[in-house]
Amino acid sequence: MSARSILMRWRKHWSFGARSLLNPRYLYGLVNESGNRLVNWSAWSTPGVLGAFAVVCLILFGVLITIPFSRDEQLVFSLVIVSVALYMRRYVGTLVTLVLVSLSVLASTRYLYWRCITSLQIEQSVDLLLGLALLAAELYAWIILIVGYFQTAWPLKRKPVPMPQDLSMWPTVDVFIPTYNEPLSVVMPTVIAALAMDWPRDKIKVYLLDDGRRNEFRDFAASLEVNYLTRSNNLHAKAGNINSALPETDGELIAIFDCDHIPTRTFLQATVGLFLQDSALAMVQTPHHFLSPDPFERNLQLFRLMPNEGELFYGLVQDGNDLWNATFFCGSCAVLRRTMLMEVGGVATETVTEDAHTALKLHRLGYSTAYLGVTQAAGLATESLSAHVRQRIRWARGMAQIFRIDNPLLGKGLRWPQRLCYLNAMLHFFYGLPRIIFLTAPLSYLFFEAHIIQASADLIAVYAIPHLTHANIANSRMQGKHRHTFWAEVYETALAWYIMVPTTLAMINPKFGQFNVTGKGGRVEQEYFDWKTSMPYIVILVLNIAGLVVGIGRLFWWNSHEFGTVLFNLMWTAYNLTILAATLSVALEARQIRRHWRVQIDLPAMIRLPNGRTVACEVDDFSEGGLAVKLPTEVALEQGSMVRISLFRGEREFAIPAAIVFNQGLVMRARFENMNLDDYRSLVAATFSRADAWQDWLPERDIDRPLQGIREVLGVGIEGLTRLVKRIALSRQWRRLPVWKK
């Protein structure tokens, strides 16, 4: 069939053809209304034809990147490709995503090519040095952008593999729960939920690995008949704790949970089937889901309203890694095959990110890993910004250590897609210095009149705006469910100053630094502003405000002859101020006195009143400490009255003693009281370890729109700064700054 006839038939059936092209089902060929292919692509899919097609595409791509355009020609070119992207983003399908990614790569690479070839003709040495620093930051961002597209453009979205009916085929499993200094109240529900997992009792053993060597933990384990293991030292922290338990256990598979990650009863049945399907599978990772807000969500009052910082990784990046057999081990909520783990010497101890390094070692031996993006456990997020920063510092230092001593680009055993996925994960944590450069670059002109980009403002705009626009369109397309536009800048700005030095030192000396445990289960007794953590942001914020003031003077008086250049730098500074204001808002720690976070859920329940009468109701939310129920009618019951509340899981009933703390209208709240160990086990079985506990966790959220994203960041920044100024004014803290919060 000729190309002309194909085109005519496709145009004839345009309405259907558009839909089919934009549907992944039809990704590999044009089809008509009956679903018959208009082109037999198999005849064209020989290696020679595909190779020739790839070469032609690369040549065309290279021409479009390097061909010189005048300002007006570049403007027309930019308008065309931006218009195409804006039109195509309305449609669904993987093909459309790949087209948007290709346009973004084209626009960004053309911008970087122009920057390298044309915009560095700078005579002043200081200007040249600053210009090279900015270009280096832009090149870093370009690499992260391109490799990130490769990593996430086509997520695998793996499904669970059902377990066989024959229980004799089910492998034995050891469940490891390592702990060091966490309180027993945090560890208890995890251990109890591990015992409640649906698995043959003779094929599962739960081990509490206590590096704190505490008698209360030993007694608790004995009361549940859980295996308790400890050691005489804390060498290699969590990795050493797990490795010391390996010779003491013998299960075919090892499930690992951080001590605050409570598994659902279906965790093993959802994950282990993959091991029976693939004999080369070494590890299955599931998401890290948090039932409590992280500092960004709590302090900005965005909990469950917007994707959190980690949702992008567990919602998209790991699924993208899975396509390339590059799923990372994340230290918890995972299952590993013992023989393969022992073959690499146990959990890696050379770096402080022992989990990712262990996965890298497994991949080097040719073993496969898998990611199952189904939430099967829930834990606690970091309680404060300072704790969050400390945790991320450890991650950044560990990734830099791996990059230094076991670089994925070097050595044997990895395929190139795996190398690129690991490379992106490690390079990501080097964003500290580039982010600081982006936040301060316009100040070089506003303060010192340094021209670090040797080009007019309008020429910069016709190259840079398409680059930024396409990057936002493509990333919004791929990441919209898991991260809203411009929030990545807020997250990175909050950490940039603190990860810059550790990553640099780790590259110089990989042995620098030590493993630090992230505290969980704490409370924030009163609202305060974390001056110590936020001081770098405050300094950069003040510098940008000063730059804005100076820039206004340059715009109207001192540099009016460079109106476009001044305006460009003022707009850049205004954007930086927006990001910095939102970042600073996170440092205003909100009061959090709840010991247990409430989880919203709809469950059938029944209240047995003191007089023996029962009332059917529905649970509105629950926690380890109590619950709230919605009543069908008002019930006359005084505060403090003791009742028994029955929760149901299928046909099973779990009755738990409680005291009424609030009863008004159709809402009743109760606090669990006088619970023995059996009651507590019933509570965990009926709530946290339910198979559907986190199924409907997220409410309906607005899809990401880039313009809406900048409005969100701006609104958060203004509100946060307003609250901060009011707090300082009311408390007169300005008279005794700095006030350090330990």
Image (cartoon, rainbow, N blue to C red):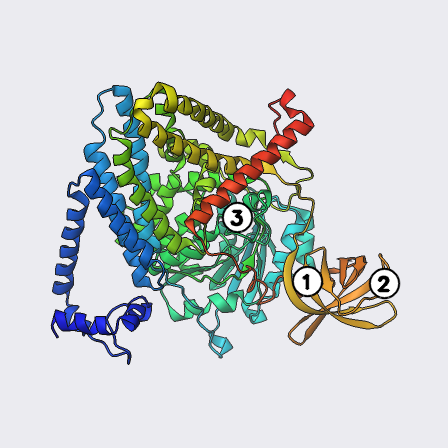
Identify residue for label 2: 637
Badge 1 marks a residue whose secondary structure is: strand
Mark closest to the chain's N terminus, 3 or 1: 3
Mark closest to the chain's N terminus, 3 or 2: 3
Mark closest to the chain's N terminus, 2 or 1: 1
Q: Crowdedness of circle 2 by 10 Å Cα count: few (<14), some, many (20+)?
A: some
Residue 474 picture location, percent across and down: 34, 52
Q: Looking at numbered disc 1 in the image, what kind of residue is underneath it?
A: Asp
Q: Crowdedness of circle 3 by 10 Å Cα count: few (<14), some, many (20+)?
A: many
Q: Is residue 290 left or right of residue 630?
A: left
Identify residue for label 3: 241
Mark sitting on residue 337: none
- Label 3 – label 2 distance at C-alpha: 50 Å
Residue 649 picture location, percent across and down: 65, 71
Q: Looking at numbered disc 3 in the image, what kind of residue is underneath it?
A: Asn
* Quadrant of the drawing holding the C terminus: top right
Q: Residue furthest bottom?
A: 34
Q: Check if mark 3's residue and mark 2's residue have beta carbons within 8 Å.
A: no
Q: What residue is rendered at 19% in x and 71% in y?
A: 41
Q: Nearer the viewer, residue 507 or 582?
A: 582
Image height of 115 relative to 314, above or below: above
